Image (cartoon, rainbow, N blue to C red):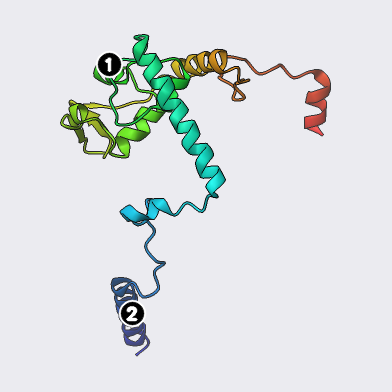
Amino acid sequence: MRTSITITSGVALLLVGYFLGASQLLSPTSLFAQGAKAKPGDAGDTGLSDETKAKIKTAADALKAAWDALEAEGKLKESATKGVNAFTVLTGGGGTFDDLKSASGVDPETFAALYAGLASDKVAVDLSRDPEGKLTYKGRVIRLYPISAIRMSYARRADITGEELIPTVDDGTKKPAKKTDTEEEATEE
């Protein structure tokens, strides 16, 4: 009799667990890393004051004027994305399309713009995704510039703009200092 009660209780518990799991009654709500897609009209409600919006518009106009000046000087080559690339302007020019074609990496703003769907018409036809969901150009995964190239770009930007841009992250080239005898004694206690 005890065996049949144990088996019946086990089967009942198994069935209750199965039905609760299948119905997801006690499951947490689904979590998505990328929330709901924004509607086209949502971007306009920024909550910024008119004064701040005017300053941003002035800055955008200045970036466009600098873009045109770089283009006139031959410092700006074909762009891989639509719109003004602030990173390219502030670092003194470049060729984002050439960077993309060479597969050596692209600047952070170009990388973000490509993932945001802002590729130029010439580039958009050759964009796709690999099985892992990474964006590819002509079958090659699009990557960021190497860290050394990004640092050189920021150094150029600091020279041009006069900003003080000093890296705060250790690049791993320094070796940790050796412990002194007093430090070792303190850790042993």
Q: Viewer-proximal residue, 168 or 47? A: 47
Residue 143 location (% of width, % of height):
33, 26
Residue position for label 1: 98
Q: Viewer-proximal residue, 87 or 168? A: 87
For image coordinates 28% across by 72% down, the residue present is 22
For image coordinates 31% across by 84% down, the residue present is 8
Q: How many marks?
A: 2
| Label drawn at residue 15 | none
For image coordinates 26% across by 34% down, the residue present is 135
Q: Secondary structure at mark 1?
A: helix
Q: Secondary structure at mark 2?
A: helix
For image coordinates 37% across by 19% down, the residue present is 68
Which residue in the rendered view is the most extreme toward the top? 73
Viewer-nearest of labels 2 and 1? 1
Q: Is residue 32 left or right of residue 80?
A: right
In contact (CB < 8 Å): disc 2 and disc 1: no
Residue 127 location (% of width, % of height):
20, 32
Residue position for label 2: 16
Residue 38 appearing in the image: no
Residue 43 appearing in the image: yes
Q: Viewer-proximal residue, 189 or 158? A: 158
Q: Amino acid at mark 2?
A: Val
Q: Amino acid at mark 1?
A: Asp
